[in-house]
Image (cartoon, rainbow, N blue to C red):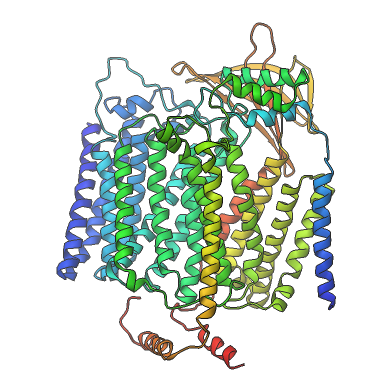
């Protein structure tokens, strides 16, 4: 029953998307504007069908309806309620279902938000684009990734439950939806970009309309990526949080281009320039979400996270090709309209800094993309199998990261149009002292090595620059000095600096050791003592958990564990972390005792880990502040022109 | 020189000095465990999907880690151990080689960045010769914009 009902909702969602896209585009082309108002009812039906499909799947999971093949694959009577609920996004078909739900939700909110302007062609084409994208994802569910395929369970059948790694940490409940809110959210600005190209209305309109939508998506993507890193740190046993794994890269790529876009639209708003570039960036961001999904869901690239082989690869690749082709053709045919009216006077200006920022972000994204797909290229060319891993990405991205930190220090103090040496010397003075202060402090507490100390110095510099802006703004306008794009943006910058410093410290000064200790024996690593106290076994409904009792620094007992699941042949480790503001002691149980030898315990000590999560919180908070309106200024206000004329007169 | 200029010289001096200290002072000496960890991080676990030897807990990865530790205890150098690993297991080097087609993964991004930077520099030069005065066309644009603002059609 659930299978048929769910599939019904999926088919309705698909049909609605197709009919909506066809009707609306026809209405625009034939000039029957009133028909465009139907976007709202279409969006409502789509939302209802997406919610319906999701609820039916949850119902099937909760009632353990194994006649739905997906439930038979990821459901089990033994799975605890929470992880049973979250198992809906633990495998391919369910995660496409979540994608469809979130996309339908966005479309509904867009339709409501713009309901008074649905007859406007710009909004009309945006709705068409959104329905086309929704149609594609519902098509996946109708065909190759049907979540409601049926299954004939033998009597007494019980499924294996979700992947054991996806049922032992609460972050599994929040990381995927938040990441998808970010990932899918970029569809909205993309749709308006396509609409701007289709209507030829390429002025400021489209991206001003979608500024908050972009910010919203970006904030969730940022949070989602960091929660993923946190999950990896808390759940996987290796003690790290970022491995340049293809799935991580797939989420990071649109973040990089999206971040570049958030900065470069400001140039277009103020100076009317970079039209092609901004359109390309947002289209690239959306395409990269599709490409990333293709790379990680099609089985072409091996990754710890990727779901097993599936048949949706060619579909995603075809859709990616379609998106890129449409974008390129539209930009190509709009060439004359896209010519930018403005010019940039000197590189030493705010807009010059944004261009450098964009160059760096583009280079960063290029390195990540190239490194991710390079093994495929080499294999296609000469059948060699090579690996491109962490060491490559670290080495290539570190200089770009340093330059970005430097730019974060310089750019916020630069005025638009032109900066004099005097201005720079005055405004960068205190940030520079913050930078050397940070370097001296890091030397004092024992940091060595050019790269980390330079990173701390540049971090201090960027933080000083961001703090300067916020302090000046709050002095001028009180609490309003915290809100608005510029000030909220500076809070985001502070979050980035915190993360950059924590990243540099934890990756440069990580210490790891593996110990086989007898009961009562103590080992020392990086100033921390760990004492092994013995094992204990705990029986859960779905697994047997074997915990090692390990005392850390005589401050408390941690319990890294290994869980044995009857259904899976693999054993799953669960690390245990002793956290402080200074450093983390991460413990994981690598092997259980064999033939009288004690268990192997891996101890990883990394400084400043907790600041990664704090920095993420600061970034999210800053994003919210940036979404509030600051000082009002209309995009069409010719703020800069009079100043230029005066300068010429002098 | 003004007082601030002098202080800028001091800031740069301290910064460079700090980097020099950070470069030449080795700090706490590296232990054998640190060396083993660094080596293990540079090689892919032969049977895993995208995990390094240091990260993976499957038996072959544990075996390789034990091998690295044993060889370090026996007094072999990092380079000797790296050669041994590459010779023993195919395709596990996470640092792509700098030869043949593989070298492109190192060269192409750097070349792209240089081309991008050159293009940006050329654009700045192009803009700087365009002149800075507003001409009649600009004035017309501003007038048109202002007119739109003060009662033009809604939309943009």
Which quadrant of the structure image shows residue A33? bottom left
Which quadrant of the structure image shows residue A425? bottom right
The residue at the point 56 percent across, 51 percent down is B110
In the image, residue A277 above or below residue A95: below
Expressed as whole percent of the image width and height from the top left, the position of residue A92 reads 36, 35
Q: Is residue A63 left or right of residue A602?
A: left
Expressed as whole percent of the image width and height from the top left, the position of residue A626 reads 53, 65
Q: Is residue A112 left or right of residue B92?
A: left
A109 or B146, which is in the foreground?
A: B146
The residue at the point 33 percent across, 76 percent down is B155
Residue farthest along the front direction in this orientation: B100
Expressed as whole percent of the image width and height from the top left, the position of residue A297 reads 38, 36
A603 or A410, which is in the foreground?
A: A410
Residue A161 seen anywhere in this rendered image of the structure: yes
B98 or A369, which is in the foreground?
A: B98
In the image, residue B125 above or below residue A643: above
Residue farthest along the top direction in this orientation: A595
């Amino acid at each position: 029953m659930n299978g048929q009902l769910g599939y019904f909702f999926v088919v309705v969602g698909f049909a609605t998307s197709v009919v909506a896209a066809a009707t609306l585009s026809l209405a625009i082309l034939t000039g029957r504007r009133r028909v465009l108002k139907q976007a709202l009812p279409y969006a409502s039906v789509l939302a209802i069908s997406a919610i319906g499909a999701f609820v039916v799947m949850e119902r099937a999971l909760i009632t353990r309806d194994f006649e739905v093949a997906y439930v038979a694959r990821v459901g089990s009577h033994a799975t605890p309620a929470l992880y049973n609920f979250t198992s809906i996004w633990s495998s391919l078909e369910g995660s496409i279902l979540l994608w469809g739900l979130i996309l339908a939700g966005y479309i509904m909110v867009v339709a409501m938000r713009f309901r008074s302007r649905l007859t406007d062609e710009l909004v009309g084409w945006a709705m068409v684009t959104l329905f086309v994208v929704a149609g594609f994802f519902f098509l996946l569910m109708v065909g190759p990734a049907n979540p409601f395929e049926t299954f004939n369970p033998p009597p007494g059948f019980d499924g294996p439950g979700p992947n054991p790694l996806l049922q032992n940490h609460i972050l599994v409940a929040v990381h995927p939806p938040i990441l998808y809110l970010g990932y899918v959210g970029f569809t909205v600005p993309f749709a308006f970009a396509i609409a701007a190209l289709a209507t030829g209305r390429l002025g400021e309109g489209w991206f001003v309309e979608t500024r908050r939508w972009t910010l919203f998506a970006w904030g969730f993507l940022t949070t989602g990526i960091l929660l993923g890193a946190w999950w990896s740190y808390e759940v996987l046993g290796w003690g790290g949080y970022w491995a340049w794994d293809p799935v991580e890269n797939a989420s990071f790529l649109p973040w990089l281009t999206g971040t570049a876009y958030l900065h470069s639209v400001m140039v277009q708003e103020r100076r009317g320039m970079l039209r092609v570039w901004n359109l390309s960036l947002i289209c690239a961001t959306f395409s990269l979400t599709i490409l990333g999904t293709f790379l990680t869901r099609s089985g072409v690239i091996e990754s710890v996270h990727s779901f097993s082989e599936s048949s949706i690869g060619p579909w995603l690749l075809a859709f990616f090709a379609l998106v890129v082709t449409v974008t390129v053709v539209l930009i190509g045919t709009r060439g004359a309209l896209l010519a930018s009216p403005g010019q940039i006077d000197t590189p030493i200006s705010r807009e010059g800094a944004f261009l450098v920022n964009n160059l760096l972000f583009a280079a960063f994204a290029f390195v990540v993309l190239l490194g991710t797909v390079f093994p495929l290229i080499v294999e296609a060319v000469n059948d060699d199998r090579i690996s491109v891993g962490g060491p490559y990405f670290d080495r290539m991205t570190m200089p770009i990261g340093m330059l970005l930190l430097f730019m974060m220090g310089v750019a916020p103090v630069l005025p638009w149009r032109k900066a004099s040496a005097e201005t720079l010397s005055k405004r960068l003075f205190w940030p520079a002292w913050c930078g050397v202060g940070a370097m001296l402090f890091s030397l004092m507490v024992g940091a060595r090595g050019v790269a980390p100390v330079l990173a701390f110095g540049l971090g201090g510099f960027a933080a000083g620059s961001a703090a300067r802006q916020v302090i000046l703004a709050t002095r001028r306008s009180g609490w309003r000095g915290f809100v608005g794009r510029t000030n909220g943006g500076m809070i985001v910058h502070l979050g980035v600096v915190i993360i950059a410093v924590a990243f540099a410290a934890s990756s440069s000064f990580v210490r790891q050791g593996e110990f086989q200790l007898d009961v009562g024996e103590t080992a020392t690593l990086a100033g921390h003592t760990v004492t092994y106290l013995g094992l204990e076994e705990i029986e859960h409904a779905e697994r047997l958990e074997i915990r090692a009792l390990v005392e850390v620094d005589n401050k408390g007992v941690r319990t890294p564990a290994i869980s044995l699941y009857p259904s899976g042949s693999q054993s799953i480790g669960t690390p245990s972390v002793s956290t402080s503001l200074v450093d983390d002691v991460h413990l994981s149980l690598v092997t259980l005792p064999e033939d009288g030898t004690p268990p192997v315990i891996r101890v990883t000590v990394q400084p400043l880990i907790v600041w990664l999560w704090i920095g993420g919180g600061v970034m999210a908070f800053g994003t919210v502040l940036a979404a509030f309106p600051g000082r009002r200024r209309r995009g069409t206000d010719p703020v800069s022109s009079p100043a230029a004329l005066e300068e010429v007169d002098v | 020189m003004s007082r601030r200029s002098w202080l800028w010289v001091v800031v740069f001096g301290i910064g460079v000095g700090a980097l020099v200290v950070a470069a030449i002072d080795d700090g706490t000496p590296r232990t054998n465990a640190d060396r083993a960890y660094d080596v293990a991080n540079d090689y892919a676990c032969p049977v895993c999907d995208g995990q390094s030897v240091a990260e993976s807990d499957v038996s072959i990865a544990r075996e390789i880690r034990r091998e690295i530790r044993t060889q370090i205890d026996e007094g072999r150098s990092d380079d000797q151990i790296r050669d041994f690993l590459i010779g023993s297991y195919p395709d596990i080097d996470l640092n792509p080689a700098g030869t043949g087609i593989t070298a492109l993964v190192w060269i192409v991004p750097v070349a792209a960045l240089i081309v991008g930077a050159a293009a940006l520099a050329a654009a700045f030069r192009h803009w700087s010769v365009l002149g800075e005065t507003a001409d009649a066309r600009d004035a017309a644009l501003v007038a048109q914009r202002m007119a739109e603002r003060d009662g033009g059609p809604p939309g943009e």
